[in-house]
Amino acid sequence: MMNLFNNYYRGKRVFITGHTGFKGSWLCKILIKAGAQITGFSLKPKTSPSLYEIANIEKEIHSTFGDIRDFAALKKCFDEAQPEIVFHLAAQPIVRDSYKLPAYTYEVNIMGTVNILECIRQSNCVKSFLNVTTDKVYWNKEWIWGYRENEELDGFDPYSNSKTCSELITRSYKRSFFTDKDGNSIVPISTARAGNVIGGGDFANDRIIPDCIRAAYEGREIEVRNPYSVRPYQHVLDPLYAYLLIAARQCEDSRYADSYNIGPDEKDCYQTGALVDLFVKKWGDGVKWVCNSDRGPHEANFLKLDCSKLKSALRWAPVWDIEKAIEKVIEWSKIWIQGKDVNEVMIRQIDEFLKDKRHGECDNYRG
């Protein structure tokens, strides 16, 4: 599996929408290390600071700033890049912001998906496409067990619902335009439904770990809205590795093109309060947290994923448990606060992740 990753992406033309975001920046960094030729299309970074800027991503890729809703601009960039592999990450990703800006959220998350699929439909260069959605696409029944890929899709809030629509649009395009009359795949297409990701360089609003880091940095108490909500937390490198694996495998064999859940093992589905407890312990310096519910809009209380399909089909498994993930977030954050080289720590963490991945595969699949 490691050889597939190292060899597959070297020299490949890769197109990433949403490359200036948190996930997109880490994905770029991994693909740069793998030797890919990367083109990114995205809005300018929405946070200040931003991982994209402080990690100097733009110096190592071809980057175009544009709105995913602008089909002409997207297609011009796409046609110039002639990509072989496409990762669609561009989105309005914040649940609370989707209540404030529902029309904008639907425009970006729905028409953005239509536009990138149209670019692929009107080209003949793409060999693999992955649409990154979310674990929140499921009709959440507050079950204590994980949702499987065949469960009903019906996100509640505008963000989750727009991502549900993105899943359905992808499914329709796949059947209508990318499958021949004999049922064979013309362009392998998958969707990836990842749980809550954490990692160094996430400066977004209304996310628990960035909120923790801001509070710790400013020397104030961490405010937690709902300490009893349960989420599948994972380090950002775990789902990104899965994205790369899916895109590569389905290109080799289109039977792998499907929808996949990507999340941690059961033991790392944490209550938010327990996650913050772990953060406080690892950060030190006497940081504390308080419960401060602001009676905001509806958000699910209980959400888990069943990732058996991905584990079985592609022999994927999460690498870093939540404790290791928190340690890596804090390591990155303290390097940044101290004004040291975040590029160095990103490369070091990627190297360590891949080493741990290789060792984990030996343990899991020996004999």
Image (cartoon, rainbow, N blue to C red):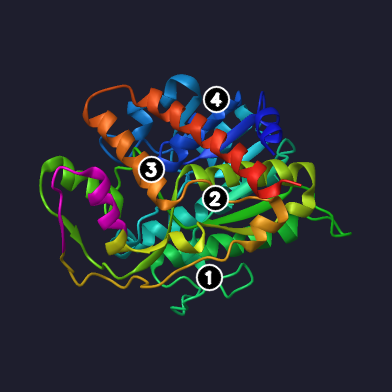
> Which tag is nearer the camera, tag 2 or tag 3?
2
Instruction: Give me the C-alpha separation between circle 3 and circle 4.
Output: 18 Å
Callout 2: few (<14), some (14-19), or many (20+) C-alpha neighbours within 10 Å? many
Residue at coordinates 34% horizontally, 26% vertically from top-left? Answer: 342
Q: Front-most of 140 and 311?
A: 311
Instruction: Give me the C-alpha separation between circle 2 and circle 1.
Output: 16 Å
Instruction: Give me the C-alpha separation between circle 2 and circle 3.
Output: 15 Å
CB contact under 8 Å: marks 1 and 4 = no
Residue topped by disc 2: 318
First in residue order: circle 1 vs circle 4: 4
Residue topped by disc 4: 33
Q: Name the quadrant containing residue 42.
A: top left
Q: Secondary structure at mark 3?
A: loop
Residue 204 painted magenta: no
Q: Secondary structure at mark 2?
A: loop
Residue at coordinates 15% horizontally, 54% vertically from top-left? Answer: 288
First in residue order: circle 4 vs circle 2: 4
The amino acid pointed to by label 2 is Pro
The amino acid pointed to by label 1 is Gly
The amino acid pointed to by label 3 is Gly
* Residue 19 visible at all: no
Q: Front-most of 189 and 340?
A: 340
Which of the numbered marks, if any, corresponds to residue 199? Answer: 3
Magenta highlight range: 275-290
Residue topped by disc 1: 146
Callout 4: few (<14), some (14-19), or many (20+) C-alpha neighbours within 10 Å? some
